């Protein structure tokens, strides 16, 4: 998940520099997730229903994933066990390329 530093409910509420920063962080985070999960695409959601703050959820998805499989993951009906090594690898990659 990528979260805007300043409270805003929508991307349009950010000034251009803030939005460009969010976009750079999103792009790099997506790249790292796709590389580490060895998937070909990502599904992105901006909902803000429970937490009215601009945040983008990134879900890596296999090229062969069906719509139903993607929505099962988004709806929390399909979960992966938390892999601490994966979390460390993500942090390490993102820290090394801080944007």
Image: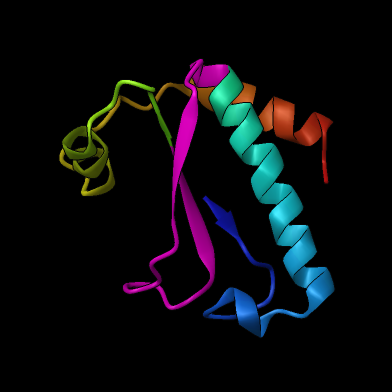
- Can you tell which quarter of the image residue 31 is in? top right
Residue 69 left/right relative to 14: left
Front-most of residues 37 and 84: 37
Residue 7 visible somewhere in the drawing: no
Residue 36 appears at what percent x and percent y? 56, 19
**73 up-or-down from 37: above or below:** below
The residue that appears at 21% across and 49% down in the rendered structure is: 75
User: From which residue to which does the magenta span run?
Assistant: 36-59
- Can you tell which quarter of the image residue 28 is in? top right
* Image colouring: rainbow
Residue 76 appears at what percent x and percent y? 22, 44
Residue 91 appears at what percent x and percent y? 66, 32
**76 up-or-down from 50: above or below:** above
Residue 32 appears at what percent x and percent y? 64, 28
- Can you tell which quarter of the image residue 35 is in? top right
Residue 7 left/right relative to 76: right
Residue 99 visible somewhere in the drawing: yes
**Residue 90 on the magenta span:** no
């Amino acid at each position: 998940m990528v979260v805007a530093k300043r409270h805003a409910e929508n991307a349009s509420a950010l000034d251009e520099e803030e939005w460009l920063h969010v976009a750079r962080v999103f792009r790099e985070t997506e790249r790292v997730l796709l590389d580490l999960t060895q998937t070909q695409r990502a599904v992105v959601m901006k909902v803000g229903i429970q937490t009215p703050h601009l945040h983008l959820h990134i879900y890596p998805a296999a090229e062969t994933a069906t719509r139903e499989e993607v929505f099962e993951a988004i709806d929390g009906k399909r979960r992966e066990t938390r892999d601490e090594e994966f979390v460390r690898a993500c942090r390490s990659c993102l820290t090394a390329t801080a944007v």
